[in-house]
Image (spheres, helix red, strand yellow):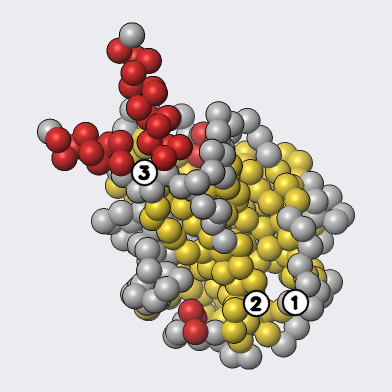
Amino acid sequence: MGQSIFNRFFKKNEDFGIAVYESDHFSFDHIQDLHLIYTRDIDSIWLKWKPMLTQADPFLFVKNDTLYLFFERVYAGKREWGRIAMTKTTDLVHWTKPVDVLSLSYHLSFPFVFEDSGEVYMIPESNEADAVCLYRANDNLTQFTFVRNLVEQPRTKDICFNFCDSHILKKDGIYYLFTSVSYRWKYSLELYYTDDLLNGKFQKHPQSPICQDNEYGRCGGSIIHLDDNYYRISQDCHTRYGENVSVIKICDISEDNYHEELYRHNVFSTGGKLYRDGVHQLNVVKHKDKYIYATDFQRLEWSWFQTLSKIRRLMSKRK
């Protein structure tokens, strides 16, 4: 009983920062040893009353020789939910001050940004909306407006998370939507498809769910396309949230078939300084002649603010 009370009030917070690397060549080996070009660290959560807690889920997007970095950021306090921010660079050295590009009345994260037919779109994680939502960007990618819900599903008592980490792979004119639902704390990776992003109905793939597992059933980034191969990034949540990421090779994907195989287990070495507490995101793009890798890194830290808030809530309930 004493151990459970201790864990309830003094459990370390799971907070994230961001690291961006560059390389002349692409490889899943030793990413943490590449040239580090940009970081967004975690403010101390021990000394500050309302520090920034999380800067996570980095997504890279390239347009007109500009590299954009979209990410989730969360501040502590009563309005503690994620919004989507963006910074950009043209030379990989000078980055703009981050600005919020999407903020709603509920938590947003995992800002998958992509281009289709000349328009730039975002599919953020919006679990609390019980839908996978599509947003369209303005010309300078500083504001996104709602377009439509791609799929919807009523929440039941068995659903813990509804539509996590959703993203699209377009292949041969078909849009394949990957999204995870947690049923009784077990992730089920669902696959949908359509031939019309803006007007078509996303149908569930005949082999969906394509994975039911807490180690590989939740994605940790968008699909990586390299040399006619497609790789899915999964995040390991089978012991605790954000332990590591693995690479799954998509061997076959069509409207009738889907087959994937484990390609690389645990991409990052968690014994090093930056990733000692874990990582749950990997995104890769090519900018000019460089391969750019965006990851987040986990920190498990004590927070007197969070602990005090929990004690206050408990005491108020007993009055």
Q: Residue at x 40, y 53 (%)?
A: 301
Nearer to us: label 3 or label 2: 2
Task: Count the numbered circles shown.
Answer: 3
Q: Which of marks 3 and 1 is nearer the N terminus?
A: 1
202 horizontally vs 6: left or right:
right
- Going 51% across and 64% down the picture, which residue do you hit? 296
Query: Which quarter of the figure has residue 146?
Result: top right
Q: In which quarter of the image is the C terminus?
A: top left
**Quadrant of the snapshot with the N terminus:** top left
Q: Position of residue 57 (x, y in %)?
A: 55, 57
User: In this orientation, which residue lies closer to the viewer: 317 or 229?
Assistant: 317
Residue in the picture at 31% in, 60% down: 215
Marks 3/2: CA distance? 35 Å
Q: Mark 3 points at which residue?
A: 182
| Residue 219 at least partly seen | yes
Residue at the far bottom in the pictured view:
24
Q: Name the residue under label 1.
A: 93
Task: Say what amino acid the circle numbered 2 marks.
Answer: Ile
Marker disc for residue 75: none
Q: Nearer the viewer, residue 27 or 202?
A: 27
Q: Are marks 1 and 2 in contact (CB under 8 Å)?
A: yes
Quick one: label 3, few (<14), some, or many (20+) residues within 10 Å?
Answer: many
Q: Position of residue 198 (x, y in %)?
A: 71, 47
Q: What element carries label 3?
A: strand
Q: Which amino acid does label 3 sit on?
A: Ser
In this view, the residue in front, 63 or 7, is: 7
State if disc 2 and disc 3 touch (CB < 8 Å): no
Residue underneath mark 2: 37
- Residue 223 lies in what quarter of the image? bottom right
Whether residue 172 is visible here, answered yes or no, is: no
